[in-house]
Structures are given as C-alpha cells and as structure tokens.
Amino acid sequence: MKKVLSSLLAVVVLVGGMYVAINSAPPKPVLTIENKTVEVAQSSYCWNGLLKTQCVDMISPPDLIEHHKITPVVVSPGADVKIKFHRKPLENTLTASIWSSNNEITNAPLNENVLSVPNEKGFYIYSLSAYWKKGSSSYVFVIEVK
C-alpha cells in the first residue's frame, strides 16, 4: 500500500512540476519556411505564471539577433513563413513587423498565421507579437531573401 501511495505521489509531483514549467513562460512559436525551421529568439514579454508574474524588457530585435548569433535562413523571394504555436494566441492578436537597418519599423501583413517575405533581395529582421490570457510576448527572427 505504501508503494502505491508513494508512486501516486511521485506521479502527482511530476505532473504538477511539468504543468508549472510549461505555464511559467510564454509559448514559443515554431516557424517554417520552404521546409526549413527558422530560429526564433525570445524578446520582451509580460507573463502571469502559476508561481510568479514577470515582465521582461529585452534589447532591440537587431541587437537580439546579434547577441544570440542567429544565422539568417536563406529563402526565395515571396516565400511564406508559417507560424504555429502550441498554445494559440488570442484571436486577432498576432502581429508582425520588419525592422530596417536604420531601426525603422514597418508592419508586415499576416494572413492566417502566414507571412509572405518581400520579393527584394536582402536581410530582413522580423518581430512577432501576440497576446494570451496569461500575458503577451514578442519574438524575433531573421531571413535573407536571395
């Protein structure tokens, strides 16, 4: 009987720990483009976790790309970036922006979690933002159109 109770307690603690770990940070998106996975860096966020609530302000997207030494994914002009989250953001809250070399920001149109990259060759740094019931988060990634 003691072994059964000990095993049950261990399972409850394990499942509880996993729940706390999963819900203590914003969900990270999975980005794919032309059958390649795009590396994404966590940017600024505010999140209400089970044990703590925190807001973290990060450096600018170009600086984050440099800091994490993220290599741009080479893509074709007009290719589509597919954005997926394990936990979907609230409806109509996902937005995308492009950061230019002089830190100007322009909106990037999204169509049902798909982002079309520019037709012009060059490097493009993107910022994604979304909201959930537990908070908001931003992410950055970089591509090179060839």
Image (cartoon, rainbow, N blue to C red):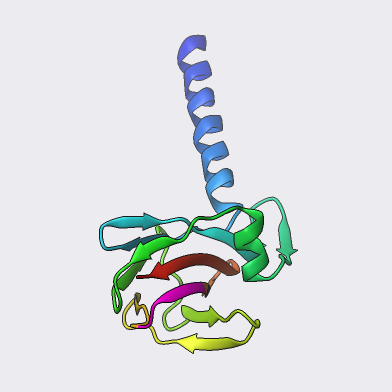
Q: Which residues are magenta?
A: 120-125
Identity of the residue drawn at 48% across and 72% down:
123
The answer to whether residue 19 is magenta is no
Residue 54: percent from left, percent from top: 73, 61
Residue at 40% in and 87% down: 109
Q: Is residue 58 left or right of residue 7?
A: right
Going by the picture, which residue comes out furthest to the left? 35
- Image coordinates for residue 40, horizontal then vertical, percent: 50, 59
Q: Is 99 situated left or right of 95 in this image?
A: right
Q: Position of residue 46 (x, y in %)?
A: 67, 67
Overall secondary structure of the magenta stretch?
strand
Expressed as whole percent of the image width and height from the top left, the position of residue 75 reads: 33, 66
Residue 49 visible at all: yes
Judging depth in this view, the residue of 1 and 109 nearest the camera is 109
The foreground one among 87 and 75 is: 75
Query: Residue 56, located in which quarter of the rendered image?
Result: bottom right
Assess whether residue 122 is covered by the magenta stretch.
yes
Residue drawn 46% across the image and 78% down it: 94
Residue placed at 52% from the left, 80% from the top? Answer: 98
* Quadrant assignment, res 89: bottom left
